[in-house]
Image: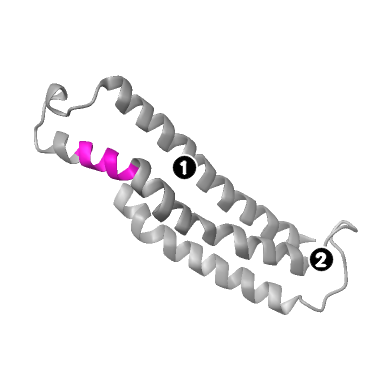
Amino acid sequence: MYNIGKSSSPLIAITATLCNGYSAYRFKDDTTLVGGIVSPFALYLAATICVPCIIPYTVLYMEPKVNKKLLTLGAMVEKGAKASELGVSEAEIRGLLIRWKGMNFVRAGLVALGALLTAVATIR
């Protein structure tokens, strides 16, 4: 499952970024305000910035801090290593998983924010 997301998520993020970037360009001269507050250009531009942020966040922050450790432990278990041979306690593994869950929530939040901004700009 991890490898499916690893290969498809960057492509989806790049595609969404290109679409939002095009939409921002397309509406750059539109003076109507969405809800009387913000232009469609600003919403599309914000979405263009939010969505691709998941790539450097994952590569520079998640990968070295948590993903690499969890994948190493997972590979050891797949090769038949016993819990006592892993060199980490169950509490440490649980801590890594909780940390990964929080980091993944941040990534999901960036994408959700981008999707919401895009929807508001589109539906207006």
Point 53% across, 43% down: residue? 106
Give neighbour class at mark 1: few <14, some 14-19, many 20+ (Cα, 10 Å): some
Q: Position of residue 56 (x, y in %)?
A: 46, 58
Q: Say whether residue 70 is magenta.
A: yes
Name the residue beneath numbered marker 1.
104
Which one is nearer the viewer's eye here, 65 or 105? 65
Q: Amino acid at mark 1?
A: Asn
Q: Which residues are magenta?
A: 67-74
**Which residue lies at the image location 83% right of the left edge and 75% below the top edge?**
30
- Residue 13's place in the image compared with 84, above or below, is below
On the image, which quarter does residue 74 sit in? Answer: top left
Q: Is residue 1 visible?
A: no
Q: Secondary structure at mark 1?
A: helix
Residue 101's x, y, as percent? 44, 35
Disc 2 to disc 1: CB gap under 8 Å: no
| Residue at (75% x, 65% y) in the render | 42
Q: Report if residue 113 lies within the magenta region.
A: no
Instruction: Indicate the secondary structure of the residue bearing disc 2.
Output: loop
CA separation, marks 2 and 1?
A: 30 Å
The chief SS type of the magenta part is: helix
* Nearest to N terminus: mark 2 or mark 1: 2
Residue 68 is left or right of residue 25, and the answer is: left
| In the image: residue 26, left or right of residue 63 | right
Which residue is located at x 47 percent, y 53 percent? 57
Vertical side of 62 occupied by 81: above or below: above
User: Can you identify the residue that label 2 sits on?
Assistant: 39
